[in-house]
Amino acid sequence: MASLPAATRELTVRGIVLGILITFVFTSANVYLGLKVGLTFATSIPAAVISMAVLRFVRNATIHENNIVQTVASAAGCIASVIFVLPGLIMVGWWQGFPFWQTFLLCASGGMMGVVLSVPLRRALVTGSDLPYPEGVAAAEVLRVGTQTREGAEESRVGLRVILVSSLASIGFAILSATKLVAAEAATWFRIGGTSAATGLWGSLSFALLGAGHLVGLSVGMAMLLGLVIAFGIATPILSFIAATPGEAADAALGAWSGQVRFLGAGVIGAAAIWTLGQLVRPIWNGLMAAAAASKARKNSAELLPIEERDLPVGWMGVITLVTALPIVGLLWHFVAQGPLSAYAIPLSLGFWLYVLLAGAFVAAVCGYMAGLIGSSNSPVSGLAILAVLGSAVLLAVAVRPLVNGDAVPQLVAFALFVTSFVLACAVIANDNLQDLKTGQLIGATPWKQQVALMVGTIAGAAVIPPILDLLNGAYGFAPLPGVAGDPRDPLPAPQATLISTLARGVLGAGDIPWNMVGIGAVLGLALVALDGVMGRKGWLRLSPLAVGIGIYLPMSVTLPVVIGALIGHYYERKRPDPISQRMGVLLASGFIVGESLFGVLLAGLIVGTDSGSPLALIGEGHEGVTMAAGTLLVVAMLAGLYRWTARAADRAAAA
């Protein structure tokens, strides 16, 4: 059989295999880091860099083949976000471990449904919108630079140098942080005016987050800044003053934020998400109609349909939806059939399959929108998981709780978490897929081939997650919720799973949550929607309500560096408005993400391999003030030097 011309090489066996191999590393790292610190990193750009490094030794490798590798690996890496819910089944005492087939089929079937839902969303949110898709654009730039460098373009050679230098700088600082010679965070906490009101400033010294800020732009950065002001400038001081918590200011401020203010953010995200979905109904419907038209055109005359518009046929989307329904219904039935709810196994499994489908479509659309707005890494997946668990728990509380006695409440709580895991698997895949499809659009890839690669990545990641979760549960465990037996020796925090499990228990009568804060947040979210509309009509800088909600909901340590990065990026682009300088700025920010992400993978492997939380530490506790000052000054100096060097590199590229 004759080989395909290089220009048509895209969905190849070697690309699929390489993507799966990268998957094993990235998915494992994301599972551990997500449980440890509550965050996962986007794997598209690191996977693209690794792919180019490997396939550049193959004579006929193409940019589209490299794109397939990063698509497989990124889909697998993002499915690890199911750890934001699944450990809750341990915390509420329903599971003792993570059974392989149940966990695998849950991740695979939910993720495959997310791939199908991303087909019409691609037309609504990628080709039919002007959303920035920072990580998708960055991945496309990385792929272009790597490919064009092979072909001898001067700008591309300079661009690749920018990526390499910024990646090495990011790795270098991450290594210093891991040795404890410089701090990974800078924070100062204080009481206000001698009262019991407490707040502070708290930011990660993270080049990846600073780079993400550059890529998301000023509008999103300012929206997140407004969220920070609401959270830590208004709500936290007021609530800590009311609570009059004694002791350290940090304990008082963080106690008020995690116990109440975060629920305010969840309410804002909920209200803004519902409004956003309402705004997306028409473009999503238009996307479905366009997908059907494209499928018909492809069937009649594929040559007349541009490659960039060839999605999975609608018929195949229907087949995949039906095929995924079988394991979802089967798993739901199996979960309910063993326990006090067994008499309701059939109606619950069928009814909540429909809920998974509808809620999955909802959160996939909102997550996809937010991924396009601020990037997959910063999209409020866990915030939307809160909405999903509230929905499932409320349905169970209304429809089932009155029919059963108190012995069934623990299984109701566990079932709400199990259902939410399906929804989350669907959401995180759609959240990541649209970034990948944006990358594909920018480089002229074939959507249906990417969508096939996304399915492969989903299944590969689903196979990795259960043994890694079981390993970590056996080594560390998860802290049980109040009233649940268990005493793990060194529990992993799993902050999102703890919060979501607490919500499920609260709705079903097994615990308390601050519903007043959720309600206030919902009202605030609607007010922010109105404010954003007014600012849009006046032509002012838009402030996305969802991005404001993120600024309230996520820790300041995550959002503050994104805000700072957005300001730095805006200043750089104003000073250097020419296209080459701006492209080099994107590559610089991309390198920041590449370097820290790659090191995160390596460090996670060292942590698991050495069974030490700080395997590279050279000094112990007691030097926090010095290391914080050193880290902050070093980051400032490195940023100034790297942006100045990038501007000079852009001048050299323009003069060539």
Image (cartoon, rainbow, N blue to C red):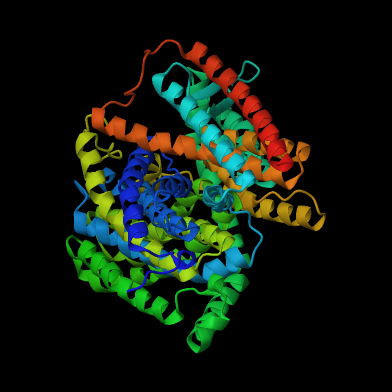
The part of the image, by quadrant, that contains residue 265 is top right
In the image, 175 versus 262, the foreground residue is: 175
Residue 614 sits above or below residue 504 on the image: above
Residue 526 appears at what percent x and percent y?
65, 55
Q: How many marks?
A: 0
Q: Residue at x 39, y 78 (%)?
A: 316
Residue 186 sits above or below residue 400 on the image: above
Q: Residue at x 28, y 66 (%)?
A: 403
Q: Is residue 367 left or right of residue 475?
A: right
Q: Is residue 189 left or right of residue 104?
A: right
Residue 651 appears at what percent x and percent y?
72, 37
Farthest left residue? 338
Q: Is residue 65 left or right of residue 146?
A: left
Q: Residue at x 54, y 22 (%)?
A: 187
Residue 613 appears at what percent x and percent y?
32, 26
Residue 581 appears at what percent x and percent y?
70, 41
The answer to whether residue 457 is visible is no
In the image, 180 versus 68, the foreground residue is: 68
